[in-house]
Image (tube, grey):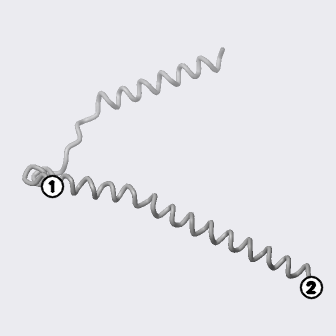
Amino acid sequence: MKPLNSAIRSFRSLILAVGMCIAFAAPASACPNCKATNDDDKRAAQGYMYSILFMIGMPATLFTGFGISFYRMTKRAAAAAEAEAIDAGTE
């Protein structure tokens, strides 16, 4: 029964923390230059949106590229080691 009480207490603390974050969060406001640009030109908001999406996608693209490169490098090294072992075994 003790772990259940601990889990309930943790869940209540989590709910309280999330509720406080929501209740005391100030509305997000843009810097004055961004606000003035968005009021004057509606296409600027779309440009900001695309730039944010690009910045969000860039780390995933980089990590994927490095991951694929390291995977290929590991496979090549394993194939070379296997070929070397076969060559050493036949001599």
Say whether disc 2 or disc 1 marks the residue closer to the N-terminus. 1
Q: Nearer the viewer, residue 23 or 74?
A: 74
Q: Secondary structure at mark 1?
A: helix
Q: Nearer the viewer, residue 60 or 5?
A: 60
The N terminus - image quarter: top right
User: Which residue is tagged 2?
Assistant: 91
- Asked if residue 63 lies left or right of residue 19, the reply is right
- Please say if 34 is above or below 81: above
What amino acid does circle 2 point to?
A: Glu
Residue 24 rendering spot, x and y as whole percentages: 29, 30
- Please say if 30 is above or below 68: above
Residue depicted at x 61% and y 18%: 4
* Quarter-of-image position of residue 43: bottom left
Image mark for residue 80: none
Q: Give the mark count.
A: 2
- Please say if 63 is above or below 80: above
Q: Residues within 10 Å of mark 1 (few under 14, many from 20)?
A: few
Image mark for residue 43: 1
Q: CA distance from mark 2 to mark 1?
A: 71 Å
Residue 26 rendering spot, x and y as whole percentages: 24, 36
Residue depicted at x 43% and y 59%: 59
- Identity of the residue furthest to the left in this view: 40
- Asked if residue 37 lies left or right of residue 62, the reply is left
Q: Secondary structure at mark 2?
A: loop
The C terminus - image quarter: bottom right
